[in-house]
Image (spheres, rainbow, N blue to C red):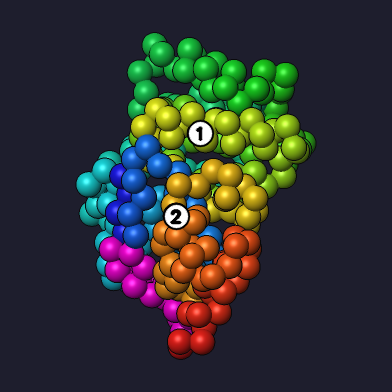
Amino acid sequence: MIVVDGLYKSFGEVKAVQSVSFTAKDSKITGLLGANGAGKSTTLRILYTVLKPDAGSATIDGVNVVEDGLAARARIGALPHGAGLYPHLTARENIAYYATLYGMDPAIIDERVQTVIDQLDINDFSDRKTKGFSQGQTTKVSLARSLVHGPHNVILDEPSNGLDVMATRSLRELIRKLKDAGKCVLFSSHVMQEVAALCDEIIIIAAGQVAIHDTTDGIRNATGCDDLEEAFVKAIDMVEMAE
């Protein structure tokens, strides 16, 4: 479970995150939505310990991400937006290297790497060097790296970016399987159809604040909009008009 409590983060005069609080539960898929610059990527970066908040706290399975970042990282699989690969390593070598960094038992790394290669259907290019990979291939290998150690919490920043229709369908099925296995899945997306199809709960961030956190139906009821995209826009407008 991921718990965020009163996070603040500024970059100079820019207040990127202002008192953001929410809980992403186990066995649930939680969507984090917001327009560009709303603060969602900053929030995710704090959760996977790339940034430190100015105030507030965040815990992964009860482990504070600031006070014990190493232990928190061991409990998450993170796919940052625009994640890169080591170009002179093969896909398999990239994944295995991350398994080593996660401190996995060397005796099981090869088997575990093959498992995620099979799960994400990347056998066709698993032994090619990643230099020159398409965006979709890069995303799949980056996702495999984030899942190789079997984390209980999975944080995905726009995971379907660059994927074709079939790859996107496979990704959605994998995310559902992670939920069914009891994992906590928190992901960011701009694709409303994807959010509506996958999410148990949705958090909409606007101007660095949580505008609304509810189920899809709850958000529609609260905004009076049947269409999720219209509800998203209205929730953002409500925050901006209140400022």
Amino acid type at mark 2: Thr
| Image quadrant assignment for residue 168 | top right
Vertical position of residue 17 compared to residue 173: above or below: below
Vertical position of residue 155 compared to residue 113: above or below: below
**Residue at 47% in and 18% down:** 112
Bounds of the magenta segment: 5-21
Which element is circle 1 on?
helix
* Residue 201 spot, x, y in % from top left: 44, 52
Residue hosting label 2: 215
Which element is circle 2 on?
loop
Give the prevailing secondary structure in the magenta stretch: strand
| Residue 212 shows in this picture | yes
**Residue at 50% in and 47% down:** 199
* Residue 35 spot, x, y in % from top left: 59, 68
Residue hosting label 1: 176
- Residues at marks 2 and 1, CA–CA distance in whole angstroms: 17 Å
